[in-house]
């Protein structure tokens, strides 16, 4: 396996003191809503644990996951960026982090399997992507597209129709295609599975 995963149950989080760095604590305190604070902290806890195990770091506060304008956080150890591909996701009480030292690009997404209205389906997906119609299929497809967006690392500036996924194969257009070309058109592999019962989970790996 080219990546490692860590999942966290958001209902059983430890205290943030001693886990967050002073810079992380400062941002954490600006989050007004408890749900957002819990999701934010849970994702960072999962990523910190992965990085600490990989780099043999005993103090989690030495691993910093700092916000950036693009939406993808910066991963910092001892004041320097860490040479690991990484990604975060959360959904309905769980957070998951992924890292890889063997590939340059990684994106993950977790979503609870739920029935959604037809308008959502037609707004979010292109017609050629809709080769199935079950709640499981549509949720899996959603996680694939979101994982691909996260792999590109600039999710806030992309539209969903710029990332197309048909039968596990990715295709980009518009701004997404520009970014993909800038990255050297890496070969992308998508994996989708039920990491947690009742959820769909996708990993996009680029090399």
Image (tube, helix red, strand yellow):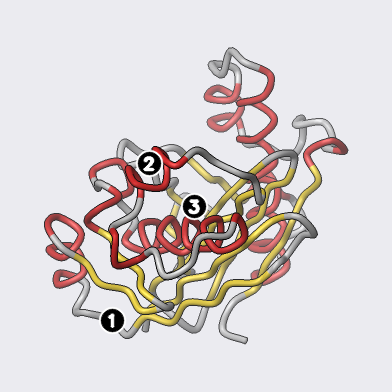
Q: Which badge, 1 or 2, comes first in the chain's sequence?
A: 2
Q: Residues within 10 Å of mark 3 (few under 14, many from 20)?
A: some
Mark 3 lies on residue:
76
Comparing labels 3 and 2, the label whose residue is closer to the camera: 2
Q: Residue at x 38, y 41 (%)?
A: 71
Please give the count of numbered marks on the rendered protein. Answer: 3
In the displayed structure, 46 sits above or below 16; it is below
Q: Which mark is residue 71?
A: 2
Residue 94: x and y in percent read 73, 46
Residue 106: x and y in percent read 45, 68
Q: Residues within 10 Å of mark 1 (few under 14, many from 20)?
A: some
Q: Which badge, 1 or 3, comes first in the chain's sequence?
A: 3
| Residue 104 appears left or right of 36 | left
Mark 1 lies on residue:
186
In the displayed structure, 206 sits above or below 23; it is below
The residue tagged with tag 2: helix, strand or loop? loop
Cα gap from disc 1 to disc 2, whole angstroms: 22 Å
Q: Residue at x 65, y 35 (%)?
A: 39
Residue 138: x and y in percent read 51, 57
Cα gap from disc 3 to disc 2, whole angstroms: 16 Å
Cα gap from disc 1 to disc 3, whole angstroms: 24 Å
């Amino acid at each position: 396996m080219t990546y490692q995963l860590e999942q966290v149950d958001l209902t059983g989080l430890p205290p943030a003191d001693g886990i967050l760095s002073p810079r992380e604590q400062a941002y954490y305190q600006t989050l007004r809503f408890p749900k957002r604070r819990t999701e934010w902290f849970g994702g960072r806890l999962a990523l910190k644990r992965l990085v600490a195990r990989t780099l043999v770091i005993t103090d989690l506060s030495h691993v910093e996951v700092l916000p950036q304008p693009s939406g993808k956080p910066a991963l910092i150890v001892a004041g320097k960026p860490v040479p690991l591909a990484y990604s975060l996701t959360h959904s309905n009480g769980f957070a998951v982090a992924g890292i890889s030292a063997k590939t340059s690009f990684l994106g993950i997404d977790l979503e609870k399997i739920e029935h959604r209205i037809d308008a959502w389906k037609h707004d979010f997906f292109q017609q050629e992507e809709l080769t199935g119609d079950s709640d499981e299929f549509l949720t899996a497809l959603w996680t694939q597209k979101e994982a691909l967006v996260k792999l590109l690392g600039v999710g806030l500036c992309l539209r969903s129709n710029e990332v197309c996924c048909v039968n596990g194969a990715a295709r980009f257009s518009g701004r997404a295609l520009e970014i993909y070309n800038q990255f050297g058109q890496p070969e992308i592999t998508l994996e989708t599975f039920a990491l947690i019962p009742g959820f769909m989970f996708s990993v996009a790996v680029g090399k």
